[in-house]
Image (cartoon, grey):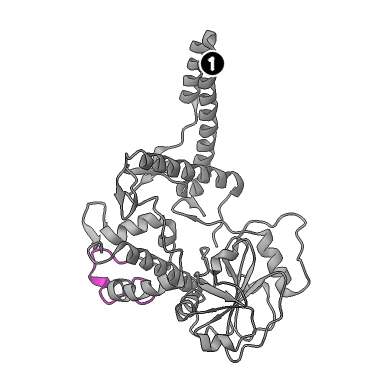
Amino acid sequence: MSVLPEAGWLNLLIGLLQGTQLQLLRLLDALGLVSHAHGQPAWPWALRLSGENLLIDPGQARRLGLTVVVLAVAVLTLLLAALWRRRRVWLVAAAALLVALAPWPEANVVLVPAYPTSFQTSPTGFTADSIERGRVLYAAQCVACHGTDGRGQGPLAASQPVWPPNLGGPLLWRRADGDVLWHVMNGMRDRRGAPTMPGFGGVLRDADAWALIDFMKAQGAGESLRAAGLWTQPIAPPDVAVQCKGKPPRSLSSWRGQRLRIVAAGASVPPLLDDPRLVTVFLAPDATTAVSQAGDCIAASSAAWAAFSLVAATSQLAGTQLIVDRDGWLRARGEPGKGAWSDDDLLCRTEQPASAGTRPLAPDGLGALIARMDAEPVRFVKGGFVH
């Protein structure tokens, strides 16, 4: 998994860029100054600030960071000028000088093309049901060009003006979800304005388009696992309703903040002992299979079974174990029949050095795996936005 340099301050800077623009859009929407597109407020400009290029060019990132600090000082100077009349002229001049001398980054690094939907977020919650709906839509609308595996090798691929991209590669993950939605609904064009992909706005509803994007994410994660042996980009587990004994149903995502162990049930899967380090949830393709399991928490859903099979890149899911970290990312996969966890099972990795003095929590393989996960959290930047 690619890891981004200088994570601490760069995280803060990218988060500031995102938060400022989101709050501006919400303010404009509250004032009735922006229109709506696909059910959400539309970004009114052709450009937006993005942190994605800053990850590639740390020098420009530092310049932008210093500029933000200088602008903050200039604003404070103007506030002081409003209160101190005798020195107002000098303070205003000082603020103007600060703005002029700020080390502004190159505009083509910070500013990227935007669409009305750039800041929109999916209402689906990346659920198993949404992924299953997206699977049906993908087969009907996309497979002819993008292929059954999303790698752009469909039967009509060669006849297209531009060869379809590999949806299992980095392209899908580099774009903001809202940008992907715009392209799905309105199509794509080359630099000369010629269409390279048709839009499906006349065929798909907004909810269908978001479901299609969910499926492409799940499929892309599975294909990257097949090709590279890793989840090259962080992926969350598909959300599904979980029934725990004597309690109301709750969503899998509601355990965020705790480590999860997801176990695909099956007749040949031996019972597992409770582990206080993890919440264990059994996954079953139907209620009949679920009844035979001794686990306290069970998700019985054919859609979830299919979605996890897609993400885990396997057609034989029974017996597979998946570990989810506290931040809600899938980190490790234990294959059926494997006796103990090892470092090779960590499939979502970071190249950041572990904190000094970090030691395994326990001598067993799972304890060492948990220790590494906790010491090396992943960071996901999609479309220049930290998740």
Q: Quadrant of residue 110?
A: top left
- Percent x, y for residue 157? 27, 71
Residue at 48% from the left image edge and 11% from the top image edge: 89
Residue at 31% from the left image edge and 49% from the top image edge: 36
State which region is magenta. Answer: 147-164
- Percent x, y for residue 238? 49, 70
Q: In the displayed structure, does residue 68 sit left or right of residue 175?
A: right
Q: Is residue 148 magenta?
A: yes
Q: In the displayed structure, does residue 184 sit left or right of residue 274?
A: left
Q: Quadrant of residue 376?
A: bottom right
Q: In the displayed structure, does residue 88 sit left or right of residue 113?
A: right
Q: Which residue is disc 1 drawn over?
A: 83
Instruction: Categorize mark 1 by other alpha carbons within 10 Å: few (<14), some (14-19), many (20+).
Output: few
Q: Give the residue type that dot 1 points to.
A: Leu
Which image quarter is the N terminus in? Answer: bottom right
Q: How many marks?
A: 1
Q: Is residue 289 magenta?
A: no
- Percent x, y for residue 141? 28, 72
SS type, badge 1: helix
Q: Is the magenta region chiefly helix, strand or loop?
A: loop
Residue at 59% from the left image edge and 60% from the top image edge: 327
Of the pair 33 and 180, the residue shown nearer to us: 33
Residue at 30% from the left image edge and 52% from the top image edge: 37
